[in-house]
Amino acid sequence: MSKKWVYLFKEGNANMKELLGGKGAGLAEMTNIGLPVPGGFTVTTEACTEYYNQDQKLSDEIIGQINDNLAILEKECEKVFGNVDNPLLVSVRSGAKFSMPGMMDTILNLGLNDETVAGIAKSTNNERFAFDSYRRFIQMFGDVVQEISKDKFDDVLDSAKEKNGYKDDTELTADDLKEIVVAYKKIVKEETGKDFPLDPKEQLLMAIEAVFRSWNNNRAISYRNMNDIPHDIGTAVNVQSMVYGNMGDDCGTGVAFTRNPATGQKKLFGEFLINAQGEDVVAGIRTPKDIDELKDIMPDVYKQFHDTAALLENHYKDMQDIEFTIEKSKLFMLQTRTGKRTAAAALRAAVEMVEEGLITKEEAILRLDPLSLDQLLHPTFEAEALKAAELLATGLPASPGAATGKIYFTAEAVCEAVANGEETLLVRKETSPEDIEGMYAANGILTARGGMTSHAAVVARGMGKCCVAGCEMIKVDEAAKKFVVGNQTFTEGDFISLNGSTGNVYKGSIKTVTPELSGHFGQIMKWSDEMRKLKVRTNADTPNDASVAVQFGAEGIGLCRTEHMFFDEHRLPSVRRMILAESSKELREKALAEILPMQKEDFIGIYKAMEGRPVTVRLLDPPLHEFLPKETKDIEALAADMGIAFEDMVTVIHGLEEFNPMLGHRGCRLAITYPEIAEMQTRAIMEAAIEVKEQDGFDVIPEIMIPLIGINEELTYLDKVVRNIAELVKKEKNSDIKYLVGTMMEIPRATLIADQIAETAEFFSFGTNDLTQMTYGFSRDDAGKFITDYKDKGILPNDPFQSIDVEGVGKLVEMGVMLGRKTKPDLKIGVCGEHGGDPKSITFFHNAGLSYVSCSPFRVPIARLAAAQAALNEAKK
């Protein structure tokens, strides 16, 4: 029995999206519930795959089934495809499972030629309508199928209107349109070297092949990459008998939503045109009317459409995006699909549909896109201002939001400009921990190098700052205080604007809009918290970050990076003295004693902000050379401050540099070489916790995390160092405060011996940034140079630094969980890498049995919603 490649609309239903695409499934469902849908058929997504398997050729079997279904359609319509006296005309539209802007546009009026156009003129008694349809068909077919620039056709149309003094297309006469048709066919001959195809069946097969080809055009591939849509599912093709909105003033066409897609308000929202065909509404050729005005022009049609829209929303239990045509005062439905909407509209519609009894709370949670909540938490550009902006370059959308300001190339320059009341952006080749103050002060950050988990990206997300990273199109010259993009040069003080949600960089200043969180947001978060099992913590290094995270619902801190506290300009000299006192433990301890009260104040502020919620503090992690100056003038200043000759200082700094610092003297290795650093930090952590408990009444249980453990003996050694100081502080303060000592699981070897490590560790926290880096052997700062190629060529499905690699890194996580809990069944296990805020990764962590995820403050709501969805999807299995 041969495979079924083509389905009549009446043979399908709403559950066949994978096979029929979203549009085909919608047409089938509307047909079967009795709505006025023009007849037609769908060539399946499987036929698209077969087309590519057959070297981009339609098989005889597929062509045969197309012809068979065309014959059935002819009978239903009582018209014949290609017949001169009573011709059947069809539209051809693409329709993948997921709505995909960037694929093929619609072709209308297919089947017209020099003979059938006369038949249409005769049967409708409207020659103008017939030739208007013919000129539209040639232009659409030429543009979409034959890939001729649409502008060439538009130029002819505009010239005809200008010559005759017409404003609108509707003023063109039949004779005008006949001339335009001749000119259009001439364009086709000039551009393709062939006459315009006049055989309707040849036209149809060429159009179907064009839809299949459009699946792999650059726009479609880019859209799938941006939205994590698989590249192998293909698109369907919908062939539908034509109805005409351009036959006169009792005809029209329109697009409408059952609710406002910008706000979610329950009210028809849309536009229509009288005497027009479908593409006219969205093409901007004429100004459409608000859907409410149809009530006055065609009251009966409006009522029927209003009732049909309500029926479809109730049937699908979701907001619908509907296309319709009116032919001779008769309504026809051409499409229904789930309507795209803003995050604010999605929240409002979801909550109100629960209140209306249309859906359950669980259904409301499952239909929301967690990542879309970014729109509600960060500034955006004003829509009209953005339209007028000049795009300069595109990098990686490293941290969402919109920012505008004057460019500066050093952290010091940013801080100085901000102190003078300026709006600023920090532009660097790449950032380092030393830039932290400038990053905090700037409106946004732009780097020429680095990936989605580079220093700039990670820190910016933690701060809720807009960041575009890895923008290799810009050439940054920090010494000359300028960057070059194309033939334009931008110097210090020039305005640019960044969109961290898209990676776009714009020239000049663009007005931004700060979103407001609605009551619907709070309701969705409340429902999410009722349903999720995973706890959600935050990565926060300052009291301000911690406060923001608490406002967004964080249940604790899963990662407090102590190194970020060392870069404050008031304590950096002490840190540097500590580092450079390599040969003298006494000098090093003296410098650490200067840092101790500063660290203690940091922890007091964070503990107070968290109001008794758990706080995991990671001991110093990065290599020491990162704290030392790089510029000659800064090295000279440090040498003078410490009474060391400049040449000797340069020698010391060079001696601390490492060939591969990510695998070098950092993390627990630092604390083993210099245990006094870990001792100072432990004292600060414990004294702060005791003080906050005594003075503010918050029962703080510090969780002290030792980073980069790969050998069990590393942990046992440092566990003793930490506990000795912790117990000493408790004794000194006469405190019975509890604390935990655990480790960050970020080296593959640690996951393999997790049962041994769990004998000492009281908690695990997976650092999946480094775990991914070390498992793949990819530098996370440089992987952006080739990851896109890997995705485009199908080597990787997605960036493993953005979504957890389940097959490899995920196996190590699962092994670490299993072995750790084999030793300690109640072991608390979290994740504090960037994956902790990624919805796909959160599903994996839920299924792997983790206790919590930790993410940047502005990702906390996303994680709460994603964790609820993970629990609900598990319950459905």
Image: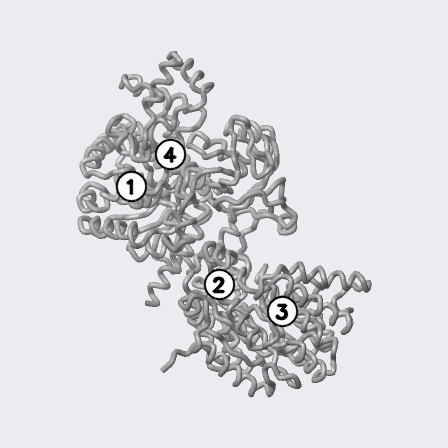
Q: How many other residues sit within 10 Å of disc 1, few (<14), some (14-19) or many (≥20)?
A: many
Quick one: 622 or 207, which is closer to the camera? 207
| Residue type at numbered disc 4 | Phe
Q: Nearer the viewer, residue 327 or 548?
A: 327
Residue 355 position (above or below residue 542): below
| Pointer 1 residue | 744
Report helix, strand or loop for mark 3.
loop
Which residue does the numbered mark 2 point to in the structure image? 215
* Front in this rendered view, residue 125 or 188: 188
Q: CA distance from mark 2 to mark 1?
A: 44 Å
Q: Position of residue 477 (x, y in %)?
A: 52, 30
Q: Quadrant of the N terminus?
A: bottom left
Q: Which residue is mark 3?
A: 195
Q: Nearer the viewer, residue 212 or 771?
A: 212
Q: Earlier in the sequence, mark 4 or mark 1?
A: 4
Residue 114, quarter of the rendered image: bottom right
Determine if residue 18 is in view: no
Mark 2 vs 3, N-terminal side: 3
Q: Nearer the viewer, mark 4 or mark 2?
A: 2
Q: Amino acid at mark 1?
A: Met
Which one is earlier in the sequence, the residue at label 1 or at label 3? 3
**Res 24 visible:** yes
Helix, strand or loop at label 1? It is strand
Q: CA distance from mark 3 to mark 4?
A: 78 Å
Query: Three-letter amino acid code at disc 3?
Result: Asp
Q: Which residue is mark 4?
A: 603
